[in-house]
């Protein structure tokens, strides 16, 4: 019997495994990097062992250090979580060689399926070689790992070589394995997967389907179970192919077989045409998936508890529990969807979700924690289980909208808008191109943003009134406060606050932390919370006031390229040097932060007059990376360029 488990991971998945271990009476051990010294998973563990350093390559990807940590802490088993070393055959072998129980599949099964190239060969789907124009578009993918790392869509043959190199470098950094391969890119299909669980006695469960079609940067955002609207015959086929894959490699433990379901041709508007959909095998993940909670909710099981039971030699029942109802999961990320999904860091002032029947929150953060730059930007997974899909979707949007997520910019508003979008609510319109078609509309501010700005401005005025001892007994002129694109004008007189812009809003009552407004005869209350870093949260809205006057020290010369996020410069374009002529859109350098690689490109054709980036350099958001002096419209260098090249 297992008595103590070390989780070779961090954040949300470590906390989730610890929760089950506590329920089972099993002691827990955490490992942590220097950046995670005070992280929630460390605080929740019974014991913790430091992995010196901050970068994943120095810490969570060091299997030798993790095994030593398990032995030092007296653990008798290791759970890999997902990501990092979870699909690393050598790590699994090292755990077993140390006399520890490996809560995962046999190393041979990992070797057969964790490499996507070998998995495809096993399933009779070889990767593309000698790509031609006729094969485009294609997808470059990392052979190890997942989560969208080391993945590139290639639409022009001339860019293939560069994308192969970039994907390989990213995969090596994320998974310690730079192998990549090429496969056909099927646009606007549905990403459907099957959860499997197998024991050492020959029983293989297929625990339903999941739909994970809503993705950005090839990483899932909203998942649900069961996958809606699939024909029964297709579901039976997916189950059979998934069970066959598991049996073919002697699989033991939890895993997921992923497919891309597509109809040909596509109907106008990207709603799928009537007909029989085709399932294309993508990969088998030899680990627990991030989205496993939706399967747990509809089947009433604890997959981590079952993983532990299987690792202890327990036999599964002949058939899995039947599914009931529908579950939907949304991943809340610290990222800005309006700025290329750029990850965000900083203090998480508040992270609170409404409780209730059928609501589940999995997180690796608590209010007051800091979001570091080194790892994935996911803050929490919010899951709702209900009798029907419609009820689950509606309830999840409600929970997200009323959550207190204060601190860095997040994708919370996008999630709410996505769940309420007609194209998501109609299963026949689900596909992986959802955000490509609808992102602009989903991120467009509504009337609520203007009302929130008014509440923030009036609450700020009330705070200042208290701070400076009241108001002068004189008629007041308009005061102006701007939050983003929302300008608010108001004045204060004998009768209180009067809102002069936007039109049609009346201030009913104003306090530093609560404002009541009347809009078109409807009275609404707004909770206002201001923080020392300049952010103001009004309900679900995050606002930052614009300064009244421009800070001259913050001005940059034209063509300045600033770091869009804090991170590490992983590489600079080969041969790039000051004085080079560059083309518009030409990649200059690459930044890596929070499991994302960001390419910095030339904003216009011109001359590179400064380059402050070098591989390995740590930069803060807004740091000057390079300067490209643009050409004039006739393509002639500007006067500044002539001086720089003289």
Image: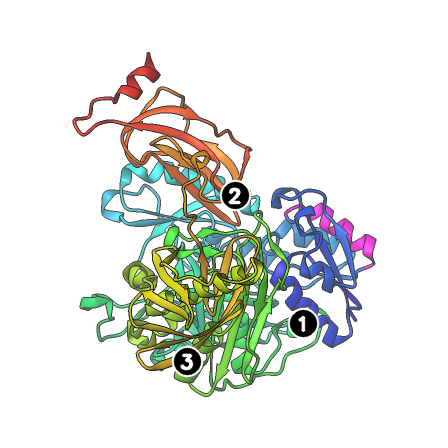
Which residue is under mark 3?
Answer: 394
Which residue is under mark 2?
Answer: 566
Label 1, secondary structure: give it.
helix
Distance between the alpha carbons at the discs numbered 1 and 3: 36 Å
Relative to 555, residue 265 above or below = below
Q: Nearer the viewer, residue 399 or 488?
A: 488
Q: Where does the C terminus fall, quadrant-wise?
A: top left
Question: Is disc 1 in contact with disc 3, using a CB cutoff of under 8 Å?
Answer: no
Tell me if mark 2 has few (under 14), some (14-19) or many (20+) residues whose alpha carbon lies within 10 angstroms of its own. many
Q: Nearer the viewer, residue 47 or 37?
A: 37
From the top left corner, tell me how far across and down residue 455 is, in percent.
Answer: 43, 67
On the question of residue 240 being in view, the answer is no
Which residue is under mark 1?
Answer: 310
- Magenta segment: does it hold 381? no
From the top left corner, tell me how far across and down residue 594 is, in percent.
Answer: 53, 49
Q: Nearer the viewer, residue 76 or 271?
A: 271
Point out the stretch of residues depicted in magenta: 61-74
Q: Residue furthest top?
A: 646
Give the left or right position of residue 244, taking residue 87 as reference: left
């Amino acid at each position: 019997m297992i008595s103590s488990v070390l989780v070779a991971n961090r954040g949300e998945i470590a906390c989730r495994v610890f929760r089950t271990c506590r329920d089972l009476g099993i002691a827990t051990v955490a490992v942590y990097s220097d950046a995670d010294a005070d992280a929630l998973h460390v605080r929740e563990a019974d014991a913790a062992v430091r992995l010196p350093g901050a970068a994943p390559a120095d810490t969570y990807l060091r299997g030798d250090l993790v095994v030593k940590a398990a032995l030092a802490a007296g653990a008798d088993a290791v759970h890999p979580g997902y990501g990092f070393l979870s699909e690393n055959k050598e790590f699994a072998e090292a755990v077993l060689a140390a006399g520890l129980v490996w809560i995962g599949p046999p190393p041979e099964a990992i070797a057969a399926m964790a490499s996507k190239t070998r998995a495809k060969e096993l399933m009779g789907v070889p990767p593309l070689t000698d790509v031609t124009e006729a094969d485009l578009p294609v997808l470059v993918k990392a052979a190890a790992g997942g989560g969208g790392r080391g993945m590139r869509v290639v639409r022009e043959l001339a860019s293939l070589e560069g994308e192969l190199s970039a994907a390989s470098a990213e995969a090596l950094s994320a998974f310690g394995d730079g192998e990549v391969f090429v496969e056909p890119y099927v646009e606007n299909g549905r990403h459907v997967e099957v959860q499997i669980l197998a024991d050492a006695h020959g029983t293989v469960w297929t625990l339903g389907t999941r739909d994970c079609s809503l993705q950005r940067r090839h990483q899932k955002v909203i998942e649900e179970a069961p996958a809606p609207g699939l024909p029964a015959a297709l579901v039976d086929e997916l189950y059979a192919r998934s069970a066959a894959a598991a049996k073919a490699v002697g699989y033991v433990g939890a895993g997921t077989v992923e497919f891309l379901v597509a109809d040909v041709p596509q109907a106008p508007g990207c709603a799928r045409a009537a007909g029989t959909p085709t399932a294309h095998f993508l990969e088998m993940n030899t680990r627990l998936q991030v989205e496993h909670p939706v399967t747990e909710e509809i089947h009433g099981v604890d997959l981590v508890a079952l993983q532990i039971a299987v690792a202890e030699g327990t036999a599964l029942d002949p058939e899995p529990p039947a599914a009931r109802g529908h579950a939907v999961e949304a991943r809340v990320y610290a990222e800005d969807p309006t700025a290329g999904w750029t990850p965000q860091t900083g203090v998480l002032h508040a992270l609170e979700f409404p409780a209730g029947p059928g609501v589940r929150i999995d997180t690796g953060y608590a209010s007051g924690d800091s979001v570091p730059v080194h790892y994935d930007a996911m803050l929490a997974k919010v899951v709702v289980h209900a009798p029907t899909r419609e009820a689950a979707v509606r309830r999840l949007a409600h929970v997200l909208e009323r959550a207190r997520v204060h601190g860095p910019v997040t994708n919370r508003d996008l999630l709410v808008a996505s769940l309420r979008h007609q194209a998501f609510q109609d299963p026949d319109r689900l596909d992986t191109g959802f955000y490509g078609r609808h992102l602009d509309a989903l991120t467009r501010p509504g009337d609520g943003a203007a009302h929130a700005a008014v509440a923030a401005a009036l609450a700020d005025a009330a705070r200042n009134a208290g701070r400076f001892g009241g108001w002068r007994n004189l008629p007041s002129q308009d005061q102006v406060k701007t939050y983003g694109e929302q300008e608010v004008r108001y004045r204060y007189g004998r009768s209180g606050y009067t809102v002069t812009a936007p039109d049609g809003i009346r201030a009913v009552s104003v306090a530093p932390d609560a404002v009541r407004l009347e809009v078109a005869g409807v009275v609404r209350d707004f909770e206002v919370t201001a923080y020392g870093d300049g952010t103001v949260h009004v309900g679900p809205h995050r606002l930052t006031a614009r300064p009244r006057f421009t800070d001259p020290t913050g001005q940059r010369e034209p063509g300045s390229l600033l770091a869009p996020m804090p991170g590490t410069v992983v590489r600079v374009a080969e041969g790039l040097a000051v004085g080079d002529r560059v083309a518009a859109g030409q990649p200059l350098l690459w930044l890596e932060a929070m499991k994302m690689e960001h390419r910095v490109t030339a904003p216009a054709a011109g001359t590179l007059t400064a380059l402050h980036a070098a591989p390995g350099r740590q930069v803060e958001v807004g740091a000057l990376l390079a300067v490209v002096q643009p050409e004039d419209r006739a393509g002639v260098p500007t006067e500044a360029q002539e001086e720089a090249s003289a």
